[in-house]
Amino acid sequence: MQPEKIGPYLISRRIGAGGMGSVFYGTHDETGAEAAIKVLSATTSGNEVSRERFTREIEVLRQLSSPWIVQLLDSGLSIDGLPYFAMEYVSGKPLSEEILEQRRLPWKQVVNYSVQLASALKAAHDAGVIHRDVKPGNVMITDEGQLKLADFGVASLFAASPLTRTGGILGTVDYMSPEQAVGRCIARSDLYSLGAVMYAMLTGRPPFLGRTTADIMHKHQFAMFDRPSRFVPEIPPRLEDLVCQLLAKKPDERPANALTVIRSLERIRQLDEATTSDVEGNAGTGTRAAEQGRTGATAAAGEVADRAAAVAMRDLMRAELEQNRRRGGLLDNTWVLISLLLLLLLFAFQMSRRENVSSTDQLTQGLKRFTQSPGQDWLRIRDEILRPALADGQISELQQEEVVRSIRAADEFEFIRSLQAATESPAERGADLVQSEINRLIRTAFNEYSEGDSTTALAQLQAVRALCAEQSGEGILLSFLDETIEQWSLDQTRPRLQLLEALLRRTAVTASGKAMSKERRAALQAARFLYADQADAVDLLAEIDRVLQQDAQEVSSSPLLPADTDSR
């Protein structure tokens, strides 16, 4: 049922709903300002964990102030005593809908969106907040094309205690970092999710697909994803490298922070703008350029890229110098500045002298490499040389066959490497063998849970918890297991309690001072037998005993009423 008013906001319509509650569109009764009002549902308001998580979201939003994050406006209690908070209303659509409509976003648009999303994460991380659920569905796009990161319901404050996790895992598995799958979450986990969102914008799908949640989680931890250029051949190598770096399995192999990501994206944008500007400037000499042939065009493009790289390096160094000048310190020294200037000039000189290799020579050298033993550079040659050459269609039929054969060989090498990574033993990975075994047992329990065998999963997780307590004592993992066990226990308890409560309600409705039907009596006796050993059902079982005893008295005092008469 839709409320007419929540706090000072007049409600017009419901605009969203989830497990925690509902979101309504409303306007302030005095100012008329638009707002999105999120209200904790009555069914979950009595749950301490849900209420604490809702309060945590308000606390997180209160600390954040950024153009790229949905802003908190107000909070309080509704007339029904339910907690709510009001956020700025974003008129637009989620990024997930944009991806669904366009299938694959142009890479320049991906860079634009990614800069904004990384800026939102920088603001959150600077405030000590980890979002933990960065995904297209939690990113709103305004009508003006500005991104707004929303839904901090599972966000974590760096210094705050963890909350109970629903199902044991926080986040959305399609965009979840490998460490989140085992209950660990750091700022770089958000960067992995950013990489997964960028991958989805570029290719129209997340990095990994699977039949089950456990399958996808396992792939995030161990499998290799297809490089974006397989789907988007025109993607700049720098952008593809950045996405792949963000999706690194180990957090320390990802960019250091969101600011580093922003600078990388800005560098990609500057290189593109410099290249475009040079191409437009030379448009009048198109006839002569065409006469020079394909090799000359490739060389010119290389020169443009080199100059753009020098320009980008110059701009970045200027920015760093300005930042350090404001801070003061070593860079106030004149000799240091002169040294840096000399380094910049040396870099520009080296870039200008770099030999430009023609596309034909590159193709020949690349194909020659495939006559030697397989290596990591096969994948780079495939993506940067062979596929573009095949797409251009300017190679001979004989070369085309060789290119296709080499691409297939690189694909097979990548597939074999992914299999080896998935089956590599902990010892081969240099991992702690004991911790790896504990992680394996935890993943097995989660697999059981996702397949529907919650009883086995709970028993196994409780056993693993005992091992962890003896092995390492208190810690993040032990807290995670305690919270997961608590939630799984509640998930097991809730269905049987609801069944017993429903049975007692139906009995109360049909009771009218007469003996109950034999079917109802048999159902109560069956419930008494099935749940006799369940400590959490003691009160309901006692009520069933009382009802059965009362029914027996009704039967003995009413000899004219057959015991099997249905009084309904």
Image (cartoon, rainbow, N blue to C red):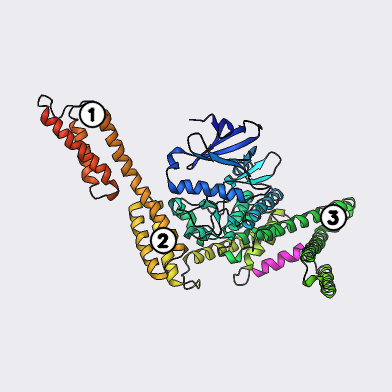
Seen from this angle, which residue lies furthest left? Answer: 559
What residue is pinned by disc 2? Answer: 442
**x and y percent of residue 491 in the render?**
37, 48
**x and y percent of residue 278 in the render?**
84, 55
Q: What is the CA distance from the residue labelled 1 to the residue labelled 3?
A: 88 Å
Q: Earlier in the sequence, mark 2 or mark 1?
A: 2
x 44%, y 60%: residue? 479
Element under label 1?
Answer: loop
Q: Amino acid at mark 3?
A: Asp
Q: What is the CA distance from the residue labelled 2 to the residue labelled 3?
A: 56 Å
- Please provide the residue range marked out in magenta: 355-371
| Vertical relation: 30 (above or below) 103 | above
Report the number of numbered marks: 3
Residue 366 highlighted magenta (yes or no): yes
Residue 511 tag number: 1
Whether pointer 2 and pointer 3 mark residues with C-beta atoms closer than 8 Å, the reply is: no
Q: Nearer the viewer, residue 304 or 385?
A: 304
**x and y percent of residue 309 in the render?**
78, 62
Residue 278 tag number: 3
| Vertical relation: 32 (above or below) 270 | above
Mark 1 or mark 3, whichever is nearer to me: 1
Q: Amino acid at mark 2?
A: Ile
Quadrant in which residue 268 is drawn: bottom right
Mark 2 or mark 3, whichever is nearer to me: 2
Q: Amino acid at mark 1?
A: Ala
Q: Nearer the viewer, residue 14 or 80?
A: 80
In this orientation, does residue 237 appear? no
